Image (cartoon, grey):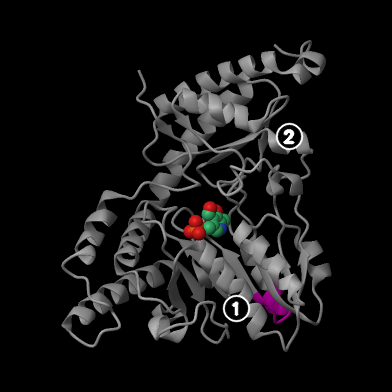
Amino acid sequence: MVKTPIYFDHAATTPLCKEALEKMTPYFSEIFGNPNSQHVFGRESVKAVDEARDTIAKIINCKPNELYFTSGGTESDNWAFRGIAEAYSNKGKHLIISPLEHAAMLSTAKALVKEGFEVDYMKVDSEGFIDLEHLKTLIRPDTIFIGCMLANNEVGTIEPIKEMAKIAKEHGIISFTDAVQAAGVIKTDVKELGVDLMSMSSHKIYGPKGCGALYVRNGIKINNLINGGHQERMKRGGTTNVPAIVGFAEAFKIAEREREENFKYVSALRDKFINRVINEVPYVKLNGPRENRLPANADFSFEYIEGESILFSLDLAGIAVSSGSACSSGSLEPSHVLLALGLPEALAHGSIRFSFGKHNTEEEIDYAVDVLRDSVKKLREMSPLFKVEGEIKYV
Ligand code: PLP
C-alpha cells in the first residue's frame, strides 16, 4: 500500500531539505548578529551572507556584487520590472513581456500602465513558446525592457531566453528573465543566457520560504524598490534575513550538484505519468510541449469537468496537486496561461497541474493514475454536460 498523503505540488513549493535546515539553525540562535553591526557578532553574520552570495554567484556565473538578496521571486520580479522602467524612463516608456508571466510581473505591468508606461505582450504558440519574430515587430525606438520567464510555472515550457536576450541586445534593450521555476532545475548561467537581470527564489528548490535573489548585471542602472538602510550595497533596505540566505545558498548548491541526476529521475516519473494518463483517461489534453519542458511538470485539461472537482477528489484520496497556478488557485478564474495558449475557457477551467519532486516514487505515480482515472470517470458520470455531449464517446 502506498503511503499518503502524496505531494505532487512541487511547482508551488518544496519541503526544506535537511542540509539547508542544519546549516540555517545556528543563525537563528547562537549566530544572531545583524550583519550591519560593527562588532564581532555582526562580522560572523556578514561572513555567512558573503559565503552564500559567493556560492550562488558561482552557480549562475556572475560576480558576487551582481547579486542582491530579496524576500523571494515576487519581490525580485517587481524590483526588476519597476526598477528598470523607472531608471530608464527618460529613454523610453515602452516595455515588452510575455502574457504567460507570473502575477508578480502581470500586476506590476498593470500598475506601470497606470503610471504612463506602455506594455506590449509577445505572442505565444499553442505550446507556450514565445514568438521571437513577433517580438521583433513589437520593438520600438522607445522600448527599454524585454522580459519573459525562463520556464513556465503552469505548463512547464522552457522558453528560448538566449535568443530573446540576443534580440534585446541587438536593439540596445535591457533583458530580464524570471528563473524562479528554472534555477536549480535546468542550467541558469547568466552569461550563457545573455540576460541583464534574472529572478530566483529559494523555496522552489528545497530552500526556505521568503528568500530569493535578483541578478543585475554590472553597468545596468536600477531604481530601488525598497528604501531603507545600507543593506545590499544600499540597493535593498531591510535587516538581512541571514538564516534564510544561508539556507537558500545551501539548497541551491545541492540542487546544482544533483541537477542532472534529478532531471533524469523526475522526468522519467513525469513521462510515466503522462503516458499512462493519455492512454487511460479519455478526453484529456496535455498542456505545454513534450520536449523543452521542465522535468517535474505535467499539466492536463479534462473535458466536461471542473479542475476544482478533480482536485478535491484527489485530495480526498491523499494526493496533493493544484489547479492552474498556485497563485490563482483559490480563485475561480480560468488560467491566464492556458487562455494565452488558445485553450477555450471551459478547458482552461478544467486543468490540473501535477508537479513531481525528487522524493516521489513510481509507486506513487501508479497510485495517482489509478485514482485519477476512477475519479474522472465518476465526476463525468455526474456531469450534466458530459451526459449530453460525451456519453456516446466515453470508452
Ligand atoms: N515567478 C514564478 C515563475 C513563480 O512560479 C513564482 C511562484 O510560484 C514566483 C515568481 C513568485 O516567487 P515567490 O513565491 O518566491 O514569491
N-term mark: 1 or 2: 1
* Side of 270 where 63 appears, left or right: left
Q: How many marks?
A: 2
Task: State which quarter of the image contains the N terminus.
Answer: top left
Describe residue 371's horizontal placement relative to residue 138 as left or right: left
Residue occupying image coordinates x 52% and y 67%: 75
**Residue 127: image location, x then y, percent:** 70, 45
Q: Quadrant of residue 139?
A: bottom right
In the drawing, what numbered circle is on residue 83?
1
Residue 164 on image: x %, y % = 68, 66
Judge whether 159 appears above or below 76 on screen. above
The residue wearing badge 2 is: 347
**What's the magenta region?**
167-174
**Disc 1 residue type (three-letter):** Gly
Q: Secondary structure at mark 2?
A: helix
Q: Are marks 1 and 2 in contact (CB under 8 Å)?
A: no
Residue 64, position as x, y percentages in the image:
39, 78
Q: Is the residue 2 above or below the residue 256 in the image?
A: above
The residue at the point 55 percent across, 22 percent down is 372
- Circle 1: element type: helix
Numbered circle sitting on residue 288: none
- How far from the left and from the top, in percent, is residue 97? 70, 65
The amino acid marked with disc number 2 is Leu
